């Protein structure tokens, strides 16, 4: 049995380099950037108006109230022309500023004299206008050469807004490893429309793992069987095909029907570690298969499987894709908590501001408390008693913070 820290070090050692591919910006949502994004142009690209109104020189408004002739009109997409002159230019939001104008007065702040067709002829300015008023300056948002995003960032809709504003039609991203899920046990039923026989349960592990991986930006295929012995498990591994990561649940402990270690030995797999000083999920197993695929054997209790995914499988995925890990927060316990010494504990928890509450129902079979949780409190190995007000690490569920 090894410590949690040693297990993470072994996972990092086994992880191969990040593999990359170019993805069109239209299809890049949820992918992980494999390059820094540096602005090749300024945003805005040119000085433009933030308001519908009239562009002018601030100096011409100093004697307000003052009347100025309207000498032109500029809409978004137009190219303003003309030499500097006394007067005002009708201008629409987003339109480029005439080079000789240095401020904008909103249309609601002036009196407008119009011709029969509605075009403005003259405006009367009621108060002086400050230079630079209502102008969006070129580069005010983004400057050319500015590093906006670092490799490892997950592409969100906000990232896509920046990429498209910069005119990037594709970006380099990390390839997503192919993942297969195997749920073991003859008692497991996947068809939710089928009535349960005595001793049977509906499968919640593989749907949870598949959904959690999807939330983190990865796709996983469920192998369509529930092996309950060594030959069946070897057949399931065969059915996983060329998946680069295979995750099974159940049959990794010390019972007579815990056949996964024996099956891996028969296959010629190399076990990297088996059993870690954690709770829940102590029997977790990590191995490399003969075809170099990564294999995680997670315990069958649902919370143990969830912990295995969050704190072990996800670490490998971060390494393989260069993904920036989720932030680890420090939070203060709201009450005392007792745990077993010499085990790192991942406790279902709910964080509110600086405080974290360890929820009731910490047993690994109890999934209902996950509905109230928004992350995991990581309770240190050496501690047995933790007191209210004590700081602990808090790891949020993907997407919760």
Image (spheres, rainbow, N blue to C red):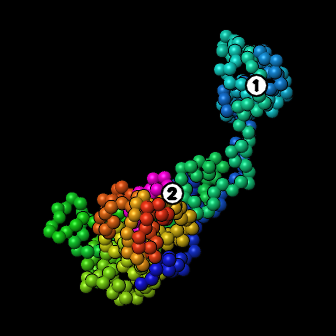
Query: Hey, which quadrant is residue 43 in on the image?
Result: top right
Query: Hey, which quadrant is residue 69 in on the image?
Result: top right
Marks 2/1 in contact by CB < 8 Å: the verdict is no
Residue for badge 1: 129
Left or right of 59 on screen, residue 229: left
When the figure is inspected, residue 227 is found, relative to residue 270, above or below; the finding is: above
Magenta extent = 344-356
Q: Residue at x 73, y 27 (%)?
A: 104
Left or right of 99 on screen, residue 1: left
Q: Foreground mark, 2 or 1?
A: 1
Query: Hey, which quadrant is residue 293 in on the image?
Result: bottom left
**Residue 333 location (% of width, % of height):** 44, 60
Magenta: main secondary structure? strand
Check residue 389 in the rendering and tell me which mark sits there, or answer none. Answer: none
Quadrant, the N terminus: bottom left
Check residue 30 in the rendering and tell me which mark sits there, or answer none. Answer: 2
Q: Is residue 342 visible?
A: yes
Residue 348 falls inside the magenta stretch: yes
**Residue 378 location (% of width, % of height):** 45, 67
Q: Residue at x 53, y 65 (%)?
A: 325
Left or right of 243 on screen, residue 235: left
When the figure is inspected, residue 3 is found, relative to residue 400, above or below; the finding is: below
Q: Is residue 234 visible?
A: no
Residue in front for this viewpoint, 280 or 285: 280
Q: Residue at x 63, y 57 (%)?
A: 149
Q: Residue at x 24, y 69 (%)?
A: 188
**Label 2, residues with CA under 10 Å away: few <14, some 14-19, many ≥20:** some
Residue in front for this viewpoint, 393 or 214: 393
When the figure is inspected, residue 240 is found, relative to residue 53, above or below; the finding is: below
């Amino acid at each position: 049995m090894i410590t949690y820290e040693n297990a993470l070090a072994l996972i990092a050692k086994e992880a191969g380099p990040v593999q990359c591919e170019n993805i069109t910006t239209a299809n890049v949502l949820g992918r992980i950037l494999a390059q820094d994004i540096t602005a090749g142009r300024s945003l805005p690209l040119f000085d433009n108006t933030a308001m519908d109104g009239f562009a002018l020189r601030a100096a011409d408004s100093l004697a307000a109230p003052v009347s100025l002739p309207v000498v032109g009109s500029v809409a978004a997409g137009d190219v303003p022309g003309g030499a500097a002159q006394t007067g005002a230019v009708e201008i629409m939001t987003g339109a480029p500023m005439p080079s000789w104008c240095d401020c904008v007065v909103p249309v609601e702040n002036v009196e407008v004299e119009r011709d029969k067709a509605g075009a403005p002829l003259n405006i009367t300015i009621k108060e002086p206008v400050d230079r630079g008023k209502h102008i969006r300056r070129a580069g005010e948002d983004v400057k050319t050469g500015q590093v906006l995003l670092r490799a490892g960032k997950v592409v969100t809709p906000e990232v896509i807004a920046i990429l498209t504003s910069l005119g990037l039609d594709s970006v380099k991203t990390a390839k997503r490893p192919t993942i297969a899920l195997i749920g073991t046990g003859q008692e497991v039923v996947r068809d939710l429309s089928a009535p349960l026989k005595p001793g049977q349960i509906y499968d919640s592990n593989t749907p949870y793992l598949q959904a959690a991986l999807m939330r983190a930006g990865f796709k996983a295929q469920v192998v369509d069987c529930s092996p309950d012995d060594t030959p069946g498990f070897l057949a399931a591994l065969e059915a996983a095909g060329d998946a680069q990561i295979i995750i099974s649940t159940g049959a990794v402990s010390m019972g007579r029907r815990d056949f996964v270690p024996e099956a891996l030995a028969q296959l010629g797999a190399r076990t990297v570690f088996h059993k870690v000083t954690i709770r829940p999920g102590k029997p977790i197993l990590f191995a490399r298969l003969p075809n170099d695929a990564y294999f995680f054997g997670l315990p069958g209790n649902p919370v143990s499987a969830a912990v295995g995914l969050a704190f072990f499988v996800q670490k490998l995925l971060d390494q393989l894709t260069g993904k920036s890990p989720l932030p680890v927060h420090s939070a203060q316990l709201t009450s005392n908590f007792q745990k077993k010494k010499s085990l790192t504990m991942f406790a279902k928890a709910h964080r509110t501001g600086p405080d974290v509450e360890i929820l009731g129902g910490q047993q690994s079979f109890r999934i209902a408390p996950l509905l109230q949780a928004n992350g995991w409190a990581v309770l240190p190995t050496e501690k047995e008693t933790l007191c209210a007000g004590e700081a602990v690490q808090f790891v949020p569920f993907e997407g919760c913070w």
